[in-house]
């Protein structure tokens, strides 16, 4: 090349740093025990919050999203797979309880009859701070949900997660939220839109859960800023 050398410069992009994972609000979340009878419940110490909802409302997905631990609560496309009371520890003497779904259950009738005394025993625990009720936003608050709210309202505060909100558009979401707010009027209850898939409302739900787990028995309901 007429004595001249050809120089080329290769532009090599440095490897990109992986995006940091979000810091978990509950880094020590882990499975504790599956209880088939009240005698198997953890000691009635500290604070715990129960998660309950109609089968296939997205309860297990909500628990996993809020705890930021995929697979903590087992999800399934088959409704009614939760058959025991599953306790998870989020920290020292801080627990959540996954209750069997209502409205549908694949468990035999004889097994379902054992749930009532267990749930009644859970309701009487001093450590129970309240209930997260998971409601499919596309269904709204149903008669089954109303029965649960009536059962628990006299003793415990309630926070309703209108789950699968990503399936609705903005106007539908606002209407569902307004309708649920009217249905909860007169109860010690709060309500919010929620989606484990899009993470809508996850931080808000975490704030409510964390505040409840740090509260004393009989403390006021969710922190300001939550729909009521």
Image (cartoon, rainbow, N blue to C red):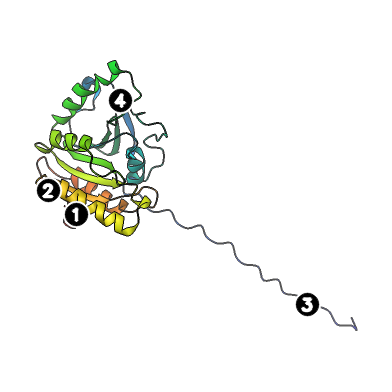
Q: Nearer the viewer, residue 63 or 21?
A: 63
- Mark 2 vs mark 4: give the one in front: 2
Q: Position of residue 50 (x, y in %)?
A: 23, 36
Task: Determine the CA span between mark 3 and mark 1.
Answer: 66 Å
Between discs 4 and 3, the one toward the N terminus: 3
205 or 14: nearer the viewer: 205
Label 2 or label 3, whichever lies nearer to me, is 2
Q: On the rendered image, what quadrant is the N terminus found in?
A: bottom right
Depth check, mark 3 against mark 1: the one in front is 1
Q: Secondary structure at mark 2?
A: loop
Pointers 3 and 1 in contact (C-beta within 8 Å): no
Upstream in the sequence, badge 1 or badge 4? Answer: 4
Please, is residue 6 above or below residue 61 in the view? below
Task: Residue 189: give x, y in percent of width and height.
Answer: 15, 46
Left or right, residue 106 beside residue 176: right
What residue is at 20 percent from the left and 23 percent from the top? 116
* Residue linked to disc 1: 227
Q: Quadrant of residue 56?
A: top left
User: x, y percentage for residue 177?
Assistant: 23, 52
Q: Residues within 10 Å of mark 3 (few under 14, many from 20)?
A: few
Mark 2–mark 4 distance (CA, rounded to whole Å): 31 Å
Q: Which residue is mark 3?
A: 7
- Whether residue 142 is visible to the viewer of this picture, yes or no, is yes
Q: Quadrant of residue 111?
A: top left
Q: Earlier in the sequence, mark 2 or mark 3?
A: 3
Q: Is residue 184 above or below residue 95?
A: below
The residue singled out by tag 2 in the image is: 185
Disc 4 versus disc 3: distance between alpha carbons? 71 Å
Please determine whether, in this image, residue 165 is positioned above or below residue 156. below
Image-based side of 80 in relation to 177, left or right: right
Disc 4 marks which residue? 84
């Amino acid at each position: 090349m007429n004595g001249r050398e050809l120089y080329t410069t290769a532009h090599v992009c440095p490897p990109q740093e992986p995006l940091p994972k979000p810091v978990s609000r509950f880094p020590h979340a882990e499975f504790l025990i599956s209880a088939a009878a009240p005698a198997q419940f953890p000691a009635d110490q500290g604070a715990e919050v129960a998660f309950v909802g109609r089968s296939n409302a997205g309860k297990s997905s909500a628990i996993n999203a809020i705890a930021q631990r995929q697979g903590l609560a087992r999800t399934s496309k088959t409704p009614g797979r939760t058959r025991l009371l599953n306790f998870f520890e989020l920290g020292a003497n801080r627990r959540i309880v996954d209750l069997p779904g209502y409205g549908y259950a694949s468990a035999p009738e004889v097994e379902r009859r054992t749930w009532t005394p267990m749930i009644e025993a859970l309701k009487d625990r001093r450590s129970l701070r309240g209930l997260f009720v998971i409601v499919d936003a596309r269904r709204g608050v149903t008669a089954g949900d109303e029965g649960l709210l009536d059962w628990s309202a006299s003793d415990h505060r309630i926070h309703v997660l209108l789950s699968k909100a990503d399936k609705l558009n903005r106007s539908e979401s606002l209407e569902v939220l307004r309708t649920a707010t009217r249905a909860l009027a007169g109860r010690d209850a709060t309500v919010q839109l929620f989606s484990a898939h899009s993470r809508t409302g996850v931080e808000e739900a975490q704030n409510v859960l964390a505040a409840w787990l740090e509260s004393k028995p009989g403390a006021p309901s969710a922190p300001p800023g939550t729909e009521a």
